Image (tube, rainbow, N blue to C red):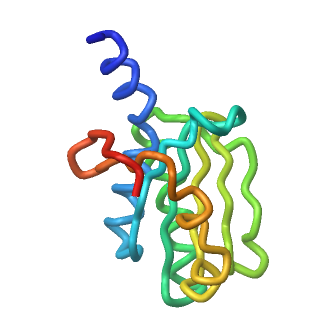
Amino acid sequence: MADRIDDDEDEARWPVAAARAADAKQADEVVVLDVGAVLAITGHFVIASASNTRLVRTIAEDIEATLAEAGGPRPRRIEGLDDLRWVLMDYGDFVVHVFLDEARRYYELERLWSDVARLDWGAGQLTDGV
């Protein structure tokens, strides 16, 4: 059992770092969803939003820079930098979504994934689904 907890914490290291980087840049409503049990292509979603496109870009850029400086992974691809309504950063093991506030309300990813656990990224612990 202890090995599973250690594996969970190690697997969540970079999504947690991404969430903290987003929060440091004043992102709104930062959440980390543990989607690995129901989605085979990735383990976590990091979701954040901002009130304007300039801040969306700043958050996405800072997440990428923070992870790189810490020796973390680089994104396999980044989409959405043209219109900055929804920037998707695919890191393979996790995906970061940085939304413009109105786009986040429209797509409601948290509602779509409401049955998965959320990671309390401030403490690094998994919590029950919302």
Q: Residue at x 65, y 54 (%)?
A: 89
Query: Is 106 left or right of 43, judged from the image as shown?
Result: right
How many numbered markers are drawn?
Answer: 0
Residue 2: quarter of image: top left
- The vertical placement of 63 against 81, above or below, is above
Q: Quadrant of the C terminus?
A: bottom left
Residue 12: quarter of image: top left
Query: Is 51 left or right of 108, judged from the image as shown?
Result: left
Q: Residue furthest left?
A: 123
- The vertical placement of 84 against 96, above or below, is below
Instruction: Tell which of 11 and 112 is nearer to you.
Output: 112
Instruction: Tell which of 44 and 57 is nearer to you.
Output: 44
Q: Residue at x 64, y 37 (%)?
A: 42
Instruction: Tell which of 71 and 43 is nearer to you.
Output: 43
Residue 58 in picture, x, y percent from top left: 51, 73
Query: Is 6 left or right of 94, judged from the image as shown?
Result: left
